[in-house]
Image: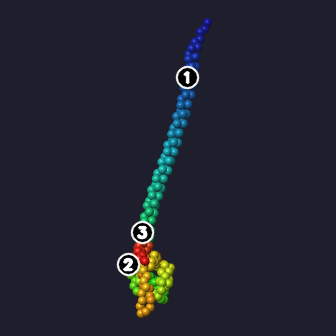
Amino acid sequence: MIRINLLPIKTSRRQEAVKQELFVALAAAGAVLVLLISLQVMLSARVNEVEAQNTLLQQEIKQVENIVKEVEQLEEMKAELEKKLSVIKQLKASKGGPVHMLDQLSQATPEKLQLVSLDEKNGRIEMTGIAVSNEVVSQFLVNLERSEYFTDVFLNEIDQSEKDGVKLKDFSITARLVVPGSTPAISDVPPADSEG
């Protein structure tokens, strides 16, 4: 009988099956490796893109900060100019203040009333005068209160006197001078205490 050795064939088939499995495993590992590399490349590209956007945003933030600083400087300059304009306006208003005050005082004075003295210190006006009656003094007080140049008008004193056989009323009035268009600093002076 002829003997045929089949062992090498079985061994070679097993080796080929192992080789085939090894090839499939290597192909799968290669595919996974390619996939991982492509994911790494994509993530790297995304990171680079985000970093580029971040750099751009940082530059924009610096530009905005510079603009904000410029705006703050301009606002400071504007506030300073407004202060200067306010001072100039006050000076203009107070320059003509005494003239307007005397004009207003003249307009407020009734016919049968005469001012004897007028004194102004730090916005406080003290005046004395004579009138023919209490009603005339009262009308003078009302006229002063209506004027935009006087506020806190107070009658301090009123007395009866006689001159050349005529009965007259001697009076004393205090008020605060307010120059329209100026700061209220003048009107902040407290009024004199009324005596009667």
Residue 126: give its label.
none
- Mark closest to the chain's N terminus, 2 or 1: 1
Residue type at the position of mark 3: Glu
- The residue closer to the viewer here, 191 or 131, is 131
Residue farthest right in this picture:
1
Residue type at the position of mark 1: Val
Q: Please give the residue where the numbered disc 2 appears in the rendered image.
A: 121
Residue 80: give its label.
3
Could you tell me which residue is drawn at 42 percent across and 64 percent down? 73
Q: Is residue 188 visible?
A: yes
Could you tell me which residue is drawn at 58 percent across and 19 percent down? 13
Helix or strand or loop: what does disc 3 sit on?
Answer: helix
Crowding around mark 3 (Cα neighbors within 10 Å: few <14, some 14 to 19, many 20+) is few
Crowding around mark 2 (Cα neighbors within 10 Å: few <14, some 14 to 19, many 20+) is few
Q: Horizontal and vertical percent for residue 130? A: 43, 86
Residue 133, compared with residue 19, is above or below; it is below
- The residue closer to the viewer here, 142 or 155, is 155
Residue type at the position of mark 2: Lys
Q: Please give the residue where the numbered disc 1 appears in the rendered image.
A: 18
Crowding around mark 1 (Cα neighbors within 10 Å: few <14, some 14 to 19, many 20+) is few
Helix or strand or loop: what does disc 2 sit on?
Answer: strand
Q: Horizontal and vertical percent for residue 162? A: 42, 89
Quadrant in the rendering for residue 185: bottom left
Estimate the spatial distance between the alpha carbons at disc 2 and disc 3, rounded to whole Å.
Answer: 30 Å
Q: Horizontal and vertical percent for residue 66? A: 44, 59
Residue farthest bottom in this picture:
164
